[in-house]
Amino acid sequence: MKASLNVQKEDAHTRERELETLRKMICEMKKDKAELQSVVDEQEKEADSLKRQVTEANWLRNENEDLLSQVQELKCLLDEAKAVATSGQCNCKITGTKVKLKTAKKKSSLGHHGAFLKQSIKVMSNVFENFSKDGWEDVSESRYGSH
């Protein structure tokens, strides 16, 4: 009987050690789980941030394409205005406004070009936001008036 009792005591001690080992493992696993959850939360925040950045990049790309389209359109208008200025004819419409020339300026070709240039600057200043701040100025009538 004593031998059986000793065996059972030994088995009980072994089970207690195994139980303690399992408790320690559970405790470590809970810590690991908490650390992993922290990493997951961090990754989710990073993913949200990246999604916002992608959305902003797409918006900026679309805005850039729109602006490039507007610039191309304005280049075409500028080329047309230059062509009209060099040909001396004025039959174009820019944003719904006809470029008008004074009849007195038609006598002199330089006066004609000066008046057209002055009117073009006025029209283009309405098209471009910071046109007047970029160093452009009205063409002086005295400069082109009588040649």
Image (spheres, helix red, strand yellow):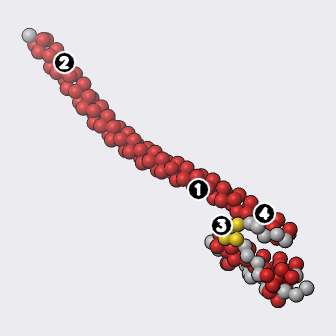
- Which label number is shown at residue 63? 1
Three-letter code, disc 1: Glu
41 relative to 12, above or below? below
Residue shown at 48% from the left, 51% from the top = 52
Nearest to the observer: residue 119 or residue 103: 103
Say whether residue 20 is left or right of residue 102.
Answer: left
Q: Nearer the viewer, mark 4 or mark 3?
A: 3
* Cα separation between marks 3 and 1: 22 Å
Say whether residue 6 is left or right of residue 46.
Answer: left
Q: Nearer the viewer, mark 2 or mark 1?
A: 1
> Which is more N-terminal, label 3 or label 2?
2
> Which is more N-terminal, label 1 or label 2?
2
* Cα separation between marks 2 and 4: 99 Å
* Cα separation between marks 2 and 1: 76 Å
Residue highlighted by disc 3: 95
- Dot 2 falls on a residue whose secondary structure is helix
Q: Nearer the viewer, mark 1 or mark 4?
A: 4
> Which is more N-terminal, label 3 or label 4?
4
Residue shown at 71% from the left, 58% from the top = 72
Classify mark 3: residues with Cα within 10 Å, few (<14), some (14-19) or many (20+): few
- Which label number is shown at residue 11? 2
- Which label number is shown at residue 79? 4
* Cα separation between marks 2 and 3: 98 Å
Q: Quadrant of residue 64?
A: bottom right
> Which is more N-terminal, label 4 or label 1?
1
Residue 131 seen in this snapshot: no
- Dot 4 falls on a residue whose secondary structure is helix
Residue shown at 58% from the left, 52% from the top = 62
Say whether residue 76 is left or right of residue 144.
Answer: left
